[in-house]
Structure formats: C-alpha cells, structure tokens
Amino acid sequence: MIYDRADGHYLGDYPSDLPPQNGGTHIGIFFTWLLNRNLLNERLVAQFPFELEEVFNREYSGRQFLADRRDGQLAEEDLSDTGNAFALAYYDSDIYFRDYAEILVGDKPSIYHVEDSWENYEKMAERIEARYSAWHQRAPRRWWQLWRS
C-alpha cells in the first residue's frame, strides 16, 4: 500500500507557479517524524543508512530523501508495524492533513505553498507527537503486552 506520493499531487490540480517538489513537502515532514521516532522498517534503514543519518542530522530533508530514493512516495513497506498502524490511524485518515492545514498552511493559497524547512518540521512534529501519544495510549495490546507503556 502506498500512503502518498508526490506525483499524485504535482501531476494533478497543482499551482503552476511552484516547483514539483513542493508536492512532497507534507509527505517528507511526516516521514522525518517517523524516522526520528524509529518507526521505519529496518530494511529501509539498512538500505539507506547514510542518507537517513543525513535526514536525522538535518543535512537533508525528508522530502529530498523520498524524492531521491523512494520516487517521492511513502509506502507501507517503508514503515515498521507500529509505524504502519499509526500511519493508518493518522495520516491515512486525513487527520494529518487537517493538522497540517491548521498549523502550516494558514492563509497560504494551498498546502503546496508550505516551505520545506526545519522550522515547519518542528511545528508539525509537536502536533504529530501529541497525536501519536494519544493514539499509543488507545492502541490495542495483547494481554502479554499490558505491562508495556
């Protein structure tokens, strides 16, 4: 399953005054948060250790990584089991997009006018973290996992 892909945005109803990479900013922000929370698939981390370290160290953005290494897409195979469960509950449910619009879009003409910056990442990461904490508290657990927080 593919959660989102940048070309699905920039090949559609997309502002003609923006570069295509802006169609992936919102995807890259979520991806970067997943990386920072260690919610990526181990295979992806093993395949791109240096590039992901650059994203982690803020030398390379999540949007750039996805565009250069994953064809601009965020897919189920890229995430851990917990990462996928959260992505389904949050990103795939459109709650993420409502949060993104509220926090970053404001009076901009579209979601594509949001700058791919670490400042914007920090603003969204705070909300994603709050959503994750609330989701994690409600996430179902097997009886032998009840001792885990």
Image (tube, rainbow, N blue to C red):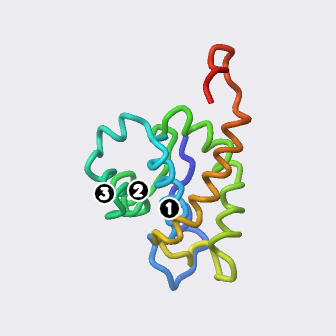
- Within-10-Å neighbours for mark 3: few <14, some 14–19, many 20+: some
- Asked if residue 58 lies left or right of residue 24, the reply is left
Query: Which amino acid type is shown beneath numbered disc 2?
Result: Leu
Q: Which residue is mark 1?
A: 6
Q: Name, please, the residue furthest toward the left.
A: 50
- Within-10-Å neighbours for mark 2: few <14, some 14–19, many 20+: many
Q: Which residue is mark 2?
A: 66
Query: Which amino acid type is shown beneath numbered disc 1?
Result: Ala
- Asked if residue 57 lies left or right of residue 31, the reply is left
Q: Secondary structure at mark 3?
A: helix
Q: Residue at x 62, y 72 (%)?
A: 104
Pointer 1 or 3: first along the chain: 1
Q: Secondary structure at mark 1?
A: loop
Q: Secondary structure at mark 2?
A: helix
Q: Name, please, the residue furthest toward the top.
A: 144
Pointer 3 or 2: first along the chain: 3
Residue 111 x %, y %: 61, 72
Image quadrant occupied by the N terminus: top right
Q: Which residue is mark 3?
A: 54
Which mark is drawn over residue 33?
none
Q: CA distance from mark 3 to mark 2?
A: 13 Å
Query: Which amino acid type is shown beneath numbered disc 3?
Result: Glu
